[in-house]
Amino acid sequence: MTARIVFRITVVALLVYLAVTQKCPASGRSESSIFGWMLRGHVYDTLLAELPFTCVFKCREDNRCQSFNWVISLLTCEFNNRTKEARPEDFIPNPERSYYPRDLKRVPLGSIQELPAETCDEIKRSEGHAISRKYWFSTLKSGTSVMAYCNMKTNDIDECSVSPSVCDINANCSNTRGSYYCTCKAGYTGDGKTCQVTDECSASPSVCDINTNCSNTRGSYYCTCKTGFTGDGKNCQDIDECSASPSVCDINANCSNTRGSYYCTCKPGFTGDGKKCQEMAVSWRRVTFKMAANNEITAIRRILPTECNSYIDLDEPGRYWSNNSGSVICDNYDPKFVNNKWYRFVGGAGRMMASYCIPKSTCSTHRSSWINGDHPTSLYTTLTTTVCMHWGSDCCERSYPVGITQCDGYYVYKLQKPTSCHESYCDVDECTAGTHDCHTSATCTNTKGSFACSCNPG
Ligand SMILES: *[C@@H]1O[C@H](CO)[C@@H](O)[C@H](O)[C@H]1NC(C)=O
Ligand SMILES: *[C@@H]1O[C@H](CO)[C@@H](O)[C@H](O)[C@H]1NC(C)=O
Ligand SMILES: *[C@@H]1O[C@H](CO)[C@@H](O)[C@H](O)[C@H]1NC(C)=O
Ligand SMILES: *[C@@H]1O[C@H](CO)[C@@H](O)[C@H](O)[C@H]1NC(C)=O
Ligand SMILES: *[C@@H]1O[C@H](CO)[C@@H](O)[C@H](O)[C@H]1NC(C)=O
């Protein structure tokens, strides 16, 4: 197409355009195209068109269209979403183009979501006159247009009138002239655009006592004393577990208090975790022998419990359970009874105490003794249990602690001195007590101080 033809078309188009605009004058103001000028930087769409007339109608169909540039050489129109009044700085001379304002029903800038403004001033320039109210803006939230109040006197957008808020939901918004700021509400931390629940517990130094657990809550926090400490959470003191009664440890253990805790250690001669201690019946010792060939052998030798070698004999025949004929025995008078010493029944006195309630007034006394528990079942082990005294209708009218160690072939008893008369430690026969070790196909025969097994016929 030659420039001449283009020029003719342009002239025809212009005449048509003028005819159209004259028939329908836009809001009383007569506006017309301006040759050799364009609006720069506001093109949202383009269209190939033989005549600018086509673009006039196309512009009327789009709410965004505020004006268009007609590019004569390309027979193209460029639709603008601004007017030259809104952006006078972008209205520039251009020999290739002509500027056409929208002729009919131009949508006021900022009045609809598809046509957001950037500033209050821009609206005022675009519309000539504008009242203070809410308008649509593209500059307050990225990628979307939102409504905000425009003060046309101060040209200030009240960003805080935007809903949802431009600040975090847990922030206060404060408008300033030309800007705004966000402040996180009490109990929240952040820049205001984002606010998080303040975690007082992560503060350093800690807001709570060193001996506490800190628990964060919404807007606050609380402190609770750690396990092993006591107090109100602000001040927590160590609990002395060792002063508790009854003791937190075994009676045969030492208790040691520590900060926030305690530990128990079995006393010498006892073994266990401290909460429970057992008397050590057997100890083991590493010994080194020097051999003739000059090589050394290390062996482990068993050391007998000392009570198996060192005890006091109870040899009075009257202690035997069925002997009721002799004089009345009272162990309270007997100087050989000292608390916590070890004793063994020997000779006519028998071998061991019964593990069941024996009749009162047996074994030459009134209160007769029996073990309310078991004898140890393995060699060189010790049990701590109770010895009962049978009197009246009570099998255990009074009782004492007793330790029993199984030695090789006999038992030794750690006894307490009885507190009154007449009571004494009694023996019974193994066959009755059921503590014999005869075979199931054998008969147990009680003998004085011992028992005998004989195989049943067959
Ligand atoms: C208006 O035009 C400018 C410039 O081309 C463009 O960046 C912007 O997205 C347009 N606005 C709308 C709402 O289409
Ligand atoms: C936030 O606003 C409320 C109500 O207006 C006020 O009570 C509070 O003190 C403000 N908080 C901050 C951190 O500005
Ligand atoms: C303190 O915190 C510890 C570790 O989180 C926990 O094991 C303990 O139970 C807490 N103690 C109290 C009293 O809350
Ligand atoms: C237990 O305590 C006693 C006296 O307080 C002390 O002599 C002994 O060494 C302690 N034993 C242990 C195992 O701590
Ligand atoms: C019964 O005990 C007395 C002494 O208390 C003693 O002299 C007597 O021999 C005992 N009898 C028997 C059968 O062991």
Image (cartoon, rainbow, N blue to C red):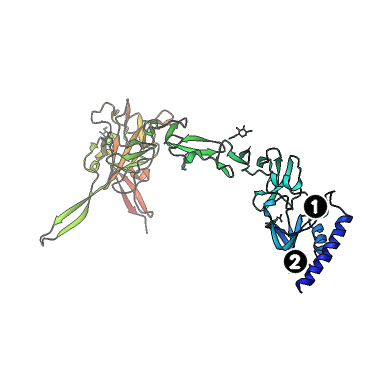
Closest to the observer, 287 or 438: 287
Q: Circle 1 is placed at which residue position?
A: 106
Ligand 4 quadrant assignment? top left
Badge 1 density bin: few <14, some 14–19, many ≥20, Cα 10 Å: some
Residue at horizontal 25%, vertical 44%? 305
Which quadrant of the structure image shows residue 357?
top left
Outermost residue to the bottom: 1
Q: Is residue 170 left or right of residue 58?
A: left
| Residue 50 visible (yes or no) | no
404 or 274, which lies in front? 274
**Residue 153 on image: x %, y %:** 70, 37
Q: Position of residue 135 (x, y in %)?
A: 73, 45
Give, as a three-letter code, the residue at label 1.
Arg
Residue depicted at x 69% and y 58%: 93
User: Looking at the figure, which quarter contains the C terminus?
Assistant: bottom left
- Label 2: how many residues lie within 10 Å, few (<14), some (14-19) or many (20+)? many
Work out which residue is located at the far front of the displayed protein and give it: 4
Q: Is residue 185 left or right of residue 158?
A: left
Give the SS element for disc 1: loop
- Mark 1 residue's CB less than 8 Å from ligand 1: no
The residue at which mark 2 appears reads as 72
Give the residue at x 37% y 40%.
275
Mark 2 residue element: helix
Mark 2 or mark 1: name the one nearer the start of the chain.
2
Q: Nearer the viewer, residue 309 or 449?
A: 309
Of marks 2 and 1, the one in the foreground? 2
Q: Amino acid at mark 2?
A: Ile
Q: Position of residue 200 (x, y in %)?
A: 50, 38
Q: Is residue 24 visible?
A: yes
> How far apart are the two marked residues, 2 and 1, measured between alpha carbons?
24 Å
Residue 214, numbered label: none
Q: Quadrant of residue 246?
A: top left
